[in-house]
């Protein structure tokens, strides 16, 4: 409490958090299955569009897709996707809020250039196939447009 006198505990918030945790525990298998299915479908579309997954099959979470863009800096793609109303992250979660390249991607054998051209897509069981289709279409358009600019 940083040296301040404590106040009244947020009993309603504590009870609400407990109920949410119970519900999440009951639905974990369905949540993992749904996000993995969305991730796999998105990955197939991304590969078709010209990007590549960063991590091998056994080394990734069901709700995260990390991809390498072909010679396009992640920051450039982030701005393009943002202009389309789609928000993703660059690098890896452990490098967010940092100006450094992702040490996780480097540890997985990615070069500095590959790490600097990586984006991360985080999924939720609440995401829909239509949302992923919109993302994949925007990514494909961005890859096409930005690769023409790069040349």
Image (cartoon, grey):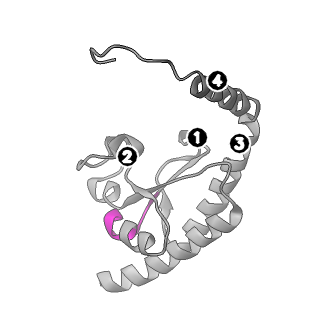
The residue singled out by tag 4 in the image is 15
**Along the line of sight, the residue nearer the viewer: 22 or 144:** 22
Mark 3 lies on a secondary structure that is helix
Verify whether residue 73 appears in magenta.
Answer: yes
Element type where label 2 sits in the image: helix
Q: In this view, does 50 lie above or below 104?
A: below
Q: Which of marks 3 and 1 is in front?
A: 3
Distance of label 3 from label 1 (alpha carbons): 18 Å
List the residue tagged with mark 3: 31
Q: Nearer the viewer, mark 4 or mark 2?
A: 4
Residue indicated by mark 2: 105
Direction from residue 125 to residue 70 in the image, left or right: left
Choose mark 3 or mark 2, whichever is in front.
3
Q: What element carries label 4?
A: helix
User: Could you tell me which quadrant the N terminus lies in?
Assistant: top left
Mark 1 or mark 4, whichever is nearer to me: 4
**Mark sitting earlier along the chain (2/1):** 1
Residue 58 got which mark?
1
In primary-sequence order, the first of circles 4 and 2 is: 4
Which one is earlier in the sequence, the residue at label 3 or at label 2?
3
Q: Nearer the viewer, mark 4 or mark 3?
A: 4
């Amino acid at each position: 409490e940083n040296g301040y006198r404590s106040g009244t505990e947020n009993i309603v918030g504590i009870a609400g958090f407990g109920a949410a945790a119970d519900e999440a525990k009951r639905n974990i298998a369905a949540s993992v299955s749904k996000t993995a299915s969305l991730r796999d479908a998105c990955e197939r579309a991304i590969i078709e569009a010209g990007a590549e997954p960063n991590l091998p099959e056994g080394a990734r979470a069901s709700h995260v897709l990390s991809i390498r863009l072909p010679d396009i800096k992640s920051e450039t793609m982030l701005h393009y996707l943002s202009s389309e109303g789609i928000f993703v992250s660059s690098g890896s979660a452990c490098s967010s809020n940092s100006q450094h390249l992702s040490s996780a991607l480097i540890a997985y054998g990615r070069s500095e250039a590959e790490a600097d051209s990586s984006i991360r897509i985080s999924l939720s069981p609440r995401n829909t196939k239509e949302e992923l289709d919109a993302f994949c279409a925007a990514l494909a358009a961005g890859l096409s447009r930005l690769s023409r600019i790069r040349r």
